[in-house]
Amino acid sequence: MNKVYITGDKHGSLRPFFGLAEKQLADSTDIMIITGDAGYVMDDDYMLKIGTLEQLFPGTICFIDGNHENHRLLNSLPVSEWQGGRVHRIGERVIHLMRGELYTIGGENYFTFGGARTVSRFVEGVEGIDWGLGEEPTEEELAEGRDRFCKYLDRIDYVITHEAPMFARHHIDRIKRVDDDYTLPGILDEWYDLISGSSRLKKWYFGHMHTDKSVTPILRGIFNNIVEAGSEERLCWA
Ligand SMILES: [Fe+2]
């Protein structure tokens, strides 16, 4: 049976995957989910990185989008279906999990919702990309996402978002400003309240804040750690 691993923002780094490859810790049935800011699809040469990823990781690499992605490029790719939800297939074994989708993997349901607003738009190596084009969920995506979230509320095992609910910020050292007109963290607070009573939900993972920290027994920030979904058992790749 496949194992599902969760990890956080990679910003294009292949280092963890070299580490995993050296230790031969994964096999072809395994799935790695990156909670946004994967950063492998940034320019027209992205297939070089995707090819390297596929050489290094024998299983399937999935990522939700963060804010530091080339959304225009991602959204130009054809949409197909994988494990019951819509995806952009980047390579044979590299997949973009879209906003507001539900995927069934090994009998467990993963709800995904990428995107966030960039606070600093001058991150090394990514200047020149069309910021603001798709990094933040639209009203339509939020409404559709909420509908699907509510529809499957008692069937969701894992929630994967890039942004964190607003309340999580009080438990995290890293400060990220929230503009008055930036509604996503507050909306995720509401979604968290809706699902936190579910007996089925095991974890809600978020990236974005660059922290490896449990905020509540359900809500877990993830960054460098690579954990098996639902557990704190970490893959040691360094
Ligand atoms: Fe990031």
Image (tube, grey):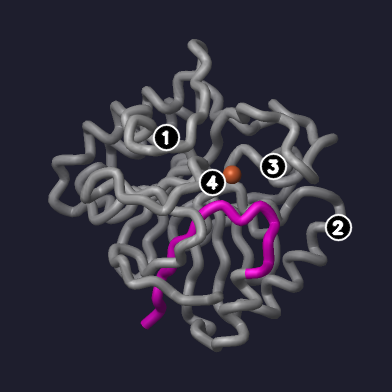
Mark 2: C-beta under 8 Å from nearest atom of ligand 1: no
* Residue nearer the viewer, 140 or 125: 125
Between label 4 and label 2, give the one nearer the viewer. Answer: 2
Magenta residue span: 1-15
Residue occupying the point 74% across, 38% down: 72
Image coordinates of residue 64 in percent, x first then y, are 54, 49
- Looking at the rendered structure, the secondary structure element under dot 1 is helix
Which dot marks residue 145? Answer: 1
Q: Main secondary structure of the magenta part?
A: loop
- Looking at the rendered structure, the secondary structure element under dot 4 is loop
- Quickly name the residue at label 3: 75
- Looking at the rendered structure, the secondary structure element under dot 3 is helix
Picture quarter with the C terminus = bottom right
Q: Tags 4 and 2 in contact by the CB under 8 Å rule?
A: no
Rendered-image quarter of ligand 1: top right
Separation of marks 3 and 1 at Cα, in angstroms: 17 Å
Residue 61 against residue 155 in the figure, above or below: below
Q: Name the amino acid type tagged 3.
A: Asn
Separation of marks 2 and 1 at Cα, in angstroms: 31 Å
Image coordinates of residue 174 in percent, x first then y, are 48, 36
Label 4 packing within 10 angstroms: few (<14), some (14-19), many (20+): many
Mark closer to the chain start, 1 or 4: 4
Decide if residue 126 is in sight here.
yes
Q: Name the amino acid type tagged 1.
A: Gly
Label 1 packing within 10 angstroms: few (<14), some (14-19), many (20+): many
- Quickly name the residue at label 4: 98
Mark closer to the chain start, 3 or 4: 3
Picture quarter with the N terminus = bottom left
- Quickly name the residue at label 2: 45
